[in-house]
Image: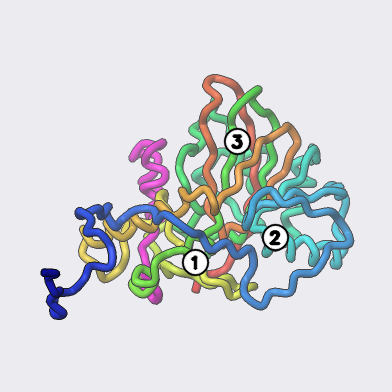
Amino acid sequence: MTAIADPTTPIPSHPALRDHRIPADGLYEGHRVLRRTPEGWEDRPYERFDVVPQASTIGAEIRGLDLSRPLTPALRDDLNRALLEWKVLFFRGQHLTSAAQRAFARNWGELETNPLLATGDAEDVARFDRSAVPTFENVWHTDVTFRERPALGAVLQLREVPAFGGDTMWADMAAAYDNLPQDVKDRIDGATAVHDFLPGFARFYSAERLAPFQEQFPPVEHPVVRRHPETGRRMLFVNTSFTTRIVGLERAESDRLLRLLFQQAHVPEFQVRFRWQAGDIAFWDNRATQHYAVNDYGTQRRVAERVAIAGDRPY
């Protein structure tokens, strides 16, 4: 006699699996949303130079320009559009003098100085030479977020390059925000975080060297998610070097959430990596990116000079 199934007994729709969760505070697997530009952005061709993409959402090589020559207003506007669309622009073999590098950067605003860094032949040229002073490598960061008005962008030129290694990487922080789970977005939208120069520099400088700058650079608060002032796009705006805590959270909760947010820069799909040659220029939007100088070149010499463009207060 055939048994009749009990209609009240649920029939499993799939086999039962053992508990297989991983800790929630990490990087998320699976599909990435990779939008290079904001929704509704008009994607127009470039007529004054060639744009060669280096990654999906971030990084493009610009060909056909001599940056030692003055920019016309139209050319400046086209380069600014490329910067907004690609976040970091690369120019090969420019070999600019310090004066020409500074003149190019001034097309985007006044240059800022940083008394915590070694300088080149002018006060607003930061010089990075690990054989002389620490060069602040091997950490994802956004420049000078410990200022009330962090830099708009920076123009970096490699004067000397090692035979191998010494690349720089950039991460798209709009893509990093886009791919956060909705519950994390809900927690951080409207939140603010404290930024302080001390964590980023205490790894390299003594307390005696840093103490005189504490009054000049007191801790500041910035939004955890800022809006880009030109595109309106939301971007994650915390970084390992300078963000110390999220306002209003207990220390343990703040640390846990910041660890999760810091890790988003580590996602390869949000990154571009640039292999330098002497005389190359990188121009990046400091509002929209983090970067990482890779210290994998041993005792070889690597000398870079950077000029930074003064920015606005994040909102």
User: Which amino acid type is marked by label 1?
Assistant: Asp
Separation of marks 3 and 2 at Cα, in angstroms: 20 Å
Element type where label 3 sits in the image: loop
Q: Give the range drawn in magenta.
A: 188-215
Relative placement, left or right, of 86 versus 1 is right
Q: Where is residue 194 in the image (x, y as percent from the top left)?
A: 36, 62
Kindly state the secondary structure of the residue where label 1 is placed.
helix
For marks 3 and 2 on the same chain, the one whose residue lies earlier in the sequence: 2
Q: Disc 2 marks which amino acid?
A: Leu
Q: Residue at x 84, y 53 (%)?
A: 50
Answer with mark 1 or mark 3, whichever residue precedes in sequence: 3
Residue positioned 69% across, 74% down in the render: 41
For badge 3, the amino acid type reads Asp
Neighbour tally class for label 1: few under 14, some 14-19, many 20 plus, Cα within 10 Å:
some
Give the Cα distance between marks 1 and 3. 26 Å
Give the foreground label among 1 and 2.
1
Residue 51 sits in quarter:
bottom right
Q: Is residue 227 left or right of residue 243?
A: right
Report the residue marked by disc 2: 83
Residue 93 horizontal/vertical position (percent): 80, 37
Q: Compare residues 256 and 285 and report the one nearer the observer.
A: 256
Q: Distance between the residues labelled 1 and 2?
A: 19 Å
| Tag 1–tag 2 contact (CB < 8 Å) | no
- Does residue 98 appear in the picture of this structure? yes
Q: Position of residue 208 (x, y in %)?
A: 35, 39
Q: Mark 1 points at which residue?
A: 178
**Few, some or many C-alpha atoms within 10 Å of disc 2 (few <14, some 14-19, many ≥20)?**
some
Q: Does the stretch in magenta take in 189? A: yes
On whether residue 21 falls in the magenta region, the answer is no
Q: Is mark 2 on a helix, strand or loop?
A: helix
